[in-house]
Amino acid sequence: MMNTGNENCELRKKLLKSCHRVVVKAGTRLLTDPKLLPHIVQQIKELRDAGKQVILVSSGAVGTGMKSLGLKKRPRKLSQVQALAALGQVKLMSQYEVECEKLGFRAAQILLTAEDLRSRERHLNALNCIETLLSDDVLPIINENDPVSVDELKFGDNDILASLLASMTRADMTIILTTVDGLKKPNPDGTLGDRISVVRGITDTQRDMARGTDDGNMSIGGMASKLKAADTLNSAGEALWLASGKETDILDRIFRGEDVGTLFLPGSSAKKKMESRKRWLSSFSKPSGKLVIDHGAVNALRRRGSSLLPSGIIGVEGDFVRGDVLEIVSPDQVLVGKGLTNFSADECRKLMGHKSSENHIILNYDADEEVIHRNNLVVK
């Protein structure tokens, strides 16, 4: 759904009025342009001077490494990409350090893998580190730890990382700076038309348009990943702004409420902002097993916000223990939600299909009635 005219203006003003913490993500093609990085740092300083807390998600390590070695094409071999990231990260942080010191503030580097956010303990450690840096008036600069990341431990790209960090840190706004000025309308001939100012709920048509787009040889994020990042945040009740970082005053223009870029807002069916544990469950946690539930239980979870009881379980998959994260799926394997289990896999198999009142009899101890309590459950 798209909004127009005065409604867009009011939406922007309302959103920006209460905006205190901002995640800014800068893309590779911006950061490998030596003229643009200083402008990005300057704009961040201006936001900080205006009382905003800023977290910077920085791409560009691989691209900077490629430029250092005179490479024009991104290698396919993982070890070569990792080596370029290791080389480029040092050079990139050196540039940030120089520019930040010129403007009178400090920056710190944090490198993360997906596993750092999936593990509840490491997730909290990363969050505490970021919070401490912000309280000490230091700019956190965050990138994926490419030199040690493998496919199963990767975020995919830094658009996704930015959206996850924004959710983790409860940022009020996420701004992705790229080389395009926003999401475009499709023309009948398949070309791109006018910029869309505000999107409330991303459509399947817009997702289809974005597939196959790419930012170039040095990067891996295209428009599809930006829409996925917006989806991640919108599902948690948060907004994302996509704008052109080639404009040297773009952040100032955004915070003046100007009609620039594309603002992605949650759709009408989106839930209210999630509390911390549910954010982790929804976006970061890695399931250890799966519970298959009947259609009655699906309706109870989705429509009534109920806890998951053993009577609704018709299948148990995997080997897990109490406190693990489980996926909950319908009989046709459609994801219903995720949650923290009160029982092990063996106990769930014994309990499934039975009434909650029988739990203590079946297990021979004073057992919980719920397999997953609604306070530890996120329904998709």
Image (tube, rainbow, N blue to C red):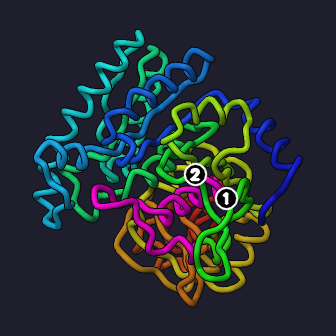
Q: Which mark is residue 174?
A: none
* Magenta-colored span: 207-236
Q: Which residue is mark 1?
A: 195
The residue lying toward the viewer, choosing from 373 and 199, is: 199
Point out the residue furthest to the right here. Answer: 6
Label 1 vs 2, first from the N-terminus = 2
**Quadrant in which residue 358 is drawn:** bottom right
Left or right of 298 on screen, residue 315: left
The residue lying toward the viewer, choosing from 344 and 135, is: 135
Residue 63 drawn at (x, y percent): 25, 48
Q: Name which residue type carries label 1.
A: Arg
Q: Is residue 56 magenta?
A: no
47 over 343 or under it: above or below: above
Q: Residue at x 33, y 46 (%)?
A: 116
Q: Secondary structure at mark 2?
A: loop
Q: Secondary structure at mark 1?
A: strand
249 over 235 or under it: above or below: above
Quadrant the C terminus occupies: bottom right
Note whether residue 365 is visible. Answer: no
Residue 366 drawn at (x, y percent): 55, 59
Q: Name which residue type carries label 2.
A: Asp
Q: Residue at x 38, y 63 (%)?
A: 321
Q: Residue at x 18, y 49 (%)?
A: 66
Residue 278 drawn at (x, y percent): 58, 51
Q: Is residue 221 magenta?
A: yes
Quadrant the N terminus occupies: bottom right
The crowd level at tag 1 (other Cα within 10 Å; few <14, some 14-19, many 20+) is: some
Q: Which residue is mark 2?
A: 181
